Amino acid sequence: MQQLSCVESCSSRLGIDLDALRANYRTLTERVAPARCGAVVKANAYGLGATRVGAALYREGCRTFFVAQLSEVAPLASAVGADAAIFILNGLDPASEGACTAAGAIPVLNSLSQVTRWRASARRLGFPLPAALQVDSGMSRLGLAVEDALALAADPACARELDLRLLMTHLACADEPGRAANGEQLAAFRRIAAHFPGVPASIANSGGVFLPPPFHADLARPGVALFGVDPGPHAVGLRPVVQLHARVLQIRTVAAGTRVGYGLDHIAPAPQRLATIALGYADGWPRSLGGAGALWHRGIRLPIVGRVSMDSLTVDISALPQGELAEGDFVECLGPSQSLADAARDARTIAYEILTRLGARHARIFVEDGNAEIVLPGRAP
Ligand SMILES: *Cc1c(COP(=O)(O)O)cnc(C)c1O
């Protein structure tokens, strides 16, 4: 992605490469064909911005979207065409039936009480309501128990009241292709799906896309892979979507023995050149990277010294040639030298967690077709 010098008034910039996002969607689509490929854009498209991400995926041909909550429907709906379906993964909150219908969203019914409430709405309105049904095939997180799903399948009134658009389940270990649990969940799901003939089936998240074709069913639901994160143990040819650069606030040279940061945890073992960077845990940079992770400049590693503060952290820049970095310059936090997976490993977390925390406080620069759109912090999705 091009470097943009036009964002003068921000202390950090999150580059979001929508061309790479679209290329990743194509890669996933080809991988699951002839099954269809939807997109999971919950949590404001993993923090990056549901409207712009949704619109780019829609332009690439995606017509099935998944969010987690009702509140995430409206921003997405405003960005995609009326022919796109938006499913709510967490289902139907109490008393949200009217709002769900008004939003034109399709709830994923996860429990019998959700099914009962949605069927009652359909009877009140006098026509069948669109729904997805999630069954629990072994993860024990969300979804109907097998016997409850079978009872619904056998109930003719249910078929009149619900317009079932999708029968789905979710894999607990899709990122570990060798786990026997994957095949066990597939078999359990297929036994139930046989009782719902004609209803499209969906099993695969990003990890599932890279499992054998039976896991692709009729519709895949990748999320994190769209954003360039490898969903399993192997690289699968996805393009990175995000880059993060943060500004140098101050540079100082300290003598051996100087103590640095909250708790004075870091004690300079020798004279060091230090740079304080405008990046802290309120920017989504994990506090667990204090004394562990690094930032980068032109391929040179700048270890984080001391604790990560709310709005800043300190790196050791002694490895850089004198004068290479000045106040106001940007250093790389995520980019060619450090992937989300690299930062996640150092922070002892997963790339998902780092990604979903990035969106709020950086200037976001969306690049697509050679154009850049800058969205300053605090602006809407
Ligand atoms: C979040 C989620 C997905 C997408 O998961 P990724 O691992 O990001 O691909 C798919 N299905 C369900 C039910 C989810 O909750």
Image: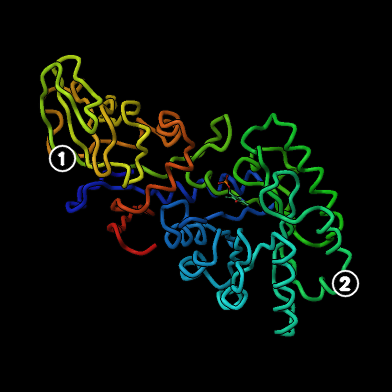
Residue 116 location, x and y as percent?
74, 70
* Residue 31 visible, this angle: yes
* Residue 34 visible, this angle: no
The quadrant in which the N terminus is found is top left
Callout 2 amino acid: Pro
Residue at 46 percent across and 42 percent down: it is: 353
The quadrant in which the C terminus is found is bottom left
- Whether 243 is drawn above or below 115: the answer is above
Residue at 73 percent across and 77 percent down: it is: 120
Q: Secondary structure at mark 1?
A: strand
- The foreground one among 239 and 140 is 140
Callout 1 amino acid: Leu
Instruction: Tell me where residue 53 sits by quadrant.
Output: bottom left
- The foreground one among 351 and 217 is 351
Q: Which residue is mark 1?
A: 249
Residue 153 location, x and y as percent?
85, 63
Q: Which residue is mark 2?
A: 156
